[in-house]
Amino acid sequence: MTEFDPSRRRILKATAVAAGGTVTAVSHVPQADAAPTKQAPQQASPASVSILLRVNGTDHEMMIDPRMTLLDTLRERLHLTGSKKGCDQGQCGACTVIVDGRRITSCLTLAVMQQGHDITTIEGLGTPANLHPMQAAFIKHDGYQCGFCTPGQICSAVAMLDEVKAGIPSHVTDDLTQRPGMTVVEFRERMSGNICRCGAYSNIQDAIAEVAGVKA
């Protein structure tokens, strides 16, 4: 067996020491010398804007964030909490209000977009002493259980009957050349965007039919 060359042994030792010293030096680099991380710049919130909303026959002037929805403005700024925030995606209908005679989901529209329009919420349809016919019919036929969806259901039903009277067809209207009829089939189709988790649909239909003057 060939004897190990001393000169080579010294070379290997020197290399190991040098390598060890390098590793130690690297592992003790001060934290302050580390490259600083970059943070994304924060976007400033948009400035508030002045708007004038006409709600339930009364004008309301206020300063709001331009990103504020009509629903949040009604509930948080005007304290009209009848309109409910359900899915906040326009799918459940709990936030339905009437704008210029047409029903809309107030969670999907900005308050600044509704200036110059006539907004009606459940609070503007009637009072405890003078109920709207649709409100009275809902009470009579027990068209609610938990009551969460009821304000949106009533606002939608009121505007829906006006749509039928105006001759606006739906997906179930048989003859588009004729005015749609006041039928339960039409009512069910037109109210399909208002969800009742309690399942009081049959009672809701009875209430709508009574106001419409037809048999459920």
Image (spheres, grey):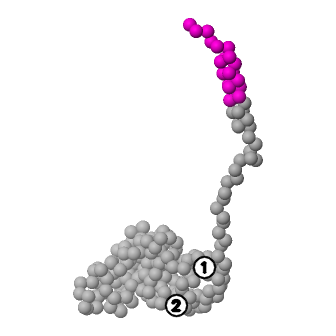
Quadrant (top left, top right, bottom left, bottom right) of the N terminus: top right
Quadrant (top left, top right, bottom left, bottom right) of the C terminus: bottom left
Q: Name the residue: 35% across, 85% down.
A: 210
Above or below: residue 58 compared with residue 106: below
| Kind of residue at disc 1 | Pro
Q: Main secondary structure of the magenta part?
A: helix
Please provide percent x and percent y for residue 13: 69, 21
Q: Which residue is mark 2?
A: 118
Task: Name the side, left or right, on which 202 lies relative to 100.
Answer: left
- The kind of secondary structure element at disc 1 is loop
Magenta span covers which residues? 1-19
Please provide percent x and percent y for residue 114: 54, 86
Q: Look at the image and say whether residue 82 sits in the magenta stretch.
A: no
Please provide percent x and percent y for residue 48: 66, 80
Instruction: Say which of 157 and 74 sits in front.
Output: 74
Above or below: residue 145 compared with residue 174: above
Q: Which mark is residue 66?
A: 1
- Mark 2 surroundings: few (<14), some (14-19) or many (≥20) residues within 10 A: some
